[in-house]
Amino acid sequence: MHEELENFERNHVWDLVKPPPNCRPIGTKWVFKNKQGEDGMVVRNKARLPGVSSKEGIDYEETFAPVARLEAIRILLAFAASKGFKLQQMDVKSAFLNGFIEEEVYVRQPPGFKSARFSDRVYKLRKALYGLKQAPIAWYARLKSFLLKSGFVMGSVDKTLFLLSRGGDTQIVQIYVDDIIFGGSSHALVSSFAEQMSREFEMSLMGELQFFLGLQIKQGLEGTFVHQAKYTRDILKKFNIGDSKPMITPMSTNTALDADEDGEAVDQKEFRGMIGSLLYLTATRPDIQFAVCLCARYQASPRTSHRQAVKRIFRYLKFTTELGLWYSSGSSLSLRGFSDADYAGCRIDRKSTSGTCQLLGTSLVSWSSRKQASVALTTTEAEYVATASCCSQLLWMKATLSDFGLRFGRILLLVDSNSAISVAKNPVLHSRTKHIDVRFHFLRDHYEKGDIDLIHVVSANQLADIFTKPLEFDAFTHLRGELVVEGVDNALIKGEIESQWTGLIALLV
């Protein structure tokens, strides 16, 4: 608590003043937290003094601050692995105390630390406190201003990405609130940036990137391995799965979930907690994406059958705790996507499920499994809608990667439906697709512009199939391996994958 108040003094956060007329000071309270490291050990005890009960229009106006998407983090990890960059990490101590605020805000003196001589006075804020609605945007504005003055250029798409080019060398900085990832082609450039940041802000230089947003990251000469083994073990323990028999797939092919209104109701809070825990795990586990998203549809009224399906996912995780994503240093930086759909898969409203994934070389950086917004009348329509969704994500990635200096011609989009490809390529078929929402027809527009190239792929090589339906063990493990979801030991022997994929793509073209 004393350390927190000393930070306030060093950063000139506030001034003790007499309350002006009609002053409505914000209350404060102490919040305590133990910060844990990758091994679960407490590395720091933190005390925060957030402001509470602030009101819009009086104490704050704008609150939005950009936050990096997980896809952006994975793109950076894959790019750095391919280029041989060693990423570093730093943490800004009391980051929000560095952000200047424009509003006139007063807060009460903190509990337990009231001035004996001036007990009737209040603090006028110069800078933001933790808990203030405008604190994130104030800190982001301060950090952005400093980086731009230092010669960095902000990403055109991702506003949390900053790049610096100097003498043929490149440095990349990715920010996530007060956590900062940085690396580059020049050790001198990276060291200079760390020194600049330490002079401007009070920093904790944490060295090589190893633990970020709950992701465990191992960087080596052969590539980078990203996993959540610690988190997986924690949720298995939390939901008491320890003695259950492991399973070899997350969902049986015989599973057909529906509302099950005659089934026995289960604890909704526990069910939602299980789903929430699993959804965060999908950040590095695409192999459970479909099963988790399917079970998540029944959170409003969970039944025993739904809980059994979720429990099977946990039992599969017990069997595959150490799996994660492998980003090879030998991977190229070509961009391609896979798209698939399960026609009328939902037993309640007969909507189809779209499955897509996008790869940078052999590195899987983005994927999705979601129910489509409208009912598709044909398999062709379901596949066409899924392909349009995949195209949209590829175009976002293309724009993001342009900030890294990567330029692409026609991006390969691999689909296992010849009819969906024909609809996108042949305007004559437009009369048959008038009932499809207009927003999906931008797929044809971008094909004609030359942004993407639609290629047919046989179903056995359709990687997105794993995101649309439950699969048998052999098919499931085959696709999981093709997506390079591996244990750390197996990942280290994946150096041959890129040459294999290059041959496959050449064959498909």
Image (cartoon, rainbow, N blue to C red):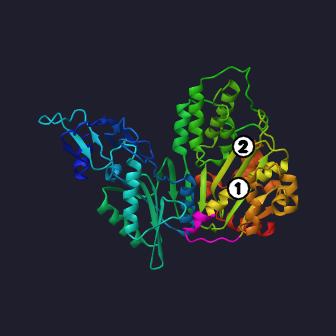
Q: Quadrant of residue 49?
A: top left
Which residue sits at x=49%, y=46%? 214
Residue 390's disc is 1
List x then y, in percent, for residue 288: 66, 43
List x then y, in percent, for residue 331: 63, 66
Which residue sits at x=58%, y=48%? 283
Quickly name the residue at label 2: 373
Q: Amino acid at mark 1?
A: Cys
Q: Quadrant of residue 482?
A: bottom right
Q: Which residues are magenta?
A: 398-409
Q: CA distance from mark 1 to mark 2?
A: 15 Å
Between 308 and 149, which is closer to the camera in this rendering? 149
Residue 463's disc is none
Q: Looking at the image, is 337 positioned above or below residue 408? A: above
Instruction: Mark yes or no: residue 274 visible.
Output: yes
Q: Residues within 10 Å of mark 1 (few under 14, many from 20)?
A: many
Picture quarter with the C terminus: bottom right
